[in-house]
Amino acid sequence: MDLATLFGLVFGTICIVVSILIGGGWAPSALMDFVDAPSIFIVVGGTLAALAIAHPISDIKRLVPLFMRSVKSPSNNTFELIEKIVHYSDTARRNGLLSIEHAMEPGDDPFLRRGLRYAVDGMDREQIEASMEAELESMGSRHSGGKRVFDTIAGMGPAFGMLGTLIGLVAMLKNMSDPKAIGPNMAIALITTFYGACIANLLFAPAATKLAIRHEEEELNKRIIIQGVLGIQAGENPRALKSRLLVFLAPQLRGSDEEA
C-alpha cells in the first residue's frame, strides 16, 4: 500500500475520532452519538442509487478494484523501465532484432512485450506507433471512466447528507411543541451531513485525485515504452536512446550520469 495514502486514511480517521471525544468530554459514549442507522442508510443508499443512475453496472463493479488501485504503490519504476528498454536495445544491436524474442522476461510490462513483438514480427514504424497509441487511448478511456465513478460518489455523498439533514429538520419542526426533543433531533439531522462530508472528503475525492495521478504515471511509462520500441525498431544507438528516454524524467531521477 502507498504509505502516504495509508497515513492519510489513518491520521484523518484519528483526527475525527479525537475531535469527537474531545467534544464529548473524552467519554466513549460520545462516539455512539455519531452512529445513526437512518442517516447511514440515506447517505449510503442514496449515493449508490445515484451511482446506478449515472453509470453502467460495468463501471460500478470496478469500484472496489479501482479503490484498491488508488491506495496501492505504483508497480513500475520508470528509471528501471528505461534501463530495461536500453538493455533490449543493446541486445537487438548486438544480436539482431529477432534475438529480443528470446531475451524477453515473463515479468516485463505486457505493453512493452507487445510492442517488442510488433517489432520482431516486422511491423513498420507507422503500424507499431498506431497500434500502441490506440491501446494507450483505450487505457485512458477506461481510467477516465473509473475516475468519474469516484467523482460521482464524492459529489453525491454530501448532497444526500444534506438531503438527510432536511428530512431530519422537517421531523424536528413537526415536533416543536416538545422543546426537550429539539436538541437531540437537530443533532441527528446534522449527522447525515457529517457522513456525507466524510465519505466525500476523506475517501472518494482524494481517491479520485490519486487515480488521476496513477493514470499520469502509467501514461508516462507507456509513452516511454512507445518511444523505446520505435527506437529499437529503427536500430537507434542504445546510449542515444537512453538519453532521449531520460528526458521524460525529472533531472534528479535520471541517475548520476544524467543529472543536470
Image (cartoon, rainbow, N blue to C red):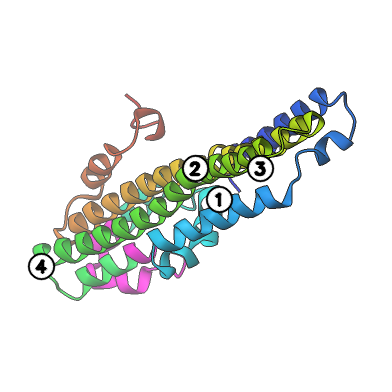
> Which secondary structure lies at badge 1?
loop
Pinpoint residue 46: horizontal percent, then vertical percent.
54, 55
Measure how far apart labels 2 and 1 are at the Cα level.
29 Å
Query: Between tags 2 and 1, which lies in front?
Result: 2
**What residue sits right under mark 2 in the picture?**
159
Residue 25, horizontal then vertical, whole percent: 87, 23
Residue on which disc 4 sits = 124
Q: Residue furthest front?
A: 177
Q: Quadrant of the C terminus?
A: top left
Above-or-below relation of 157 to 14: below
Tell me how far mark 1 sits from mark 4, CA to CA: 37 Å
Residue 166 appears anywhere in the view: yes
Q: Which mark is residue 171?
A: 3
Which dot, 2 or 3, sits closer to the camera? Answer: 3
Magenta range is 89-112
**Horizontal placement of 73 versus 26: left or right?**
left
Residue contact at pointers 2 and 1, CB within 8 angstroms = no
Observer-side mark, 1 or 4, equals 1
| Mark closer to the chain start, 2 or 3 | 2
Binning the other alpha carbons within 10 Å of mark 1 as few (below 14), some (14 to 19) or many (20 upward) gives: some
Q: Which residue is mark 1?
A: 72
Q: CA distance from mark 2 to mark 3?
A: 19 Å
The tag earlier along the polypeptide, 1 or 3, is 1
| Chain-order first, disc 3 or disc 4 | 4
Residue type highlighted by circle 3: Ala
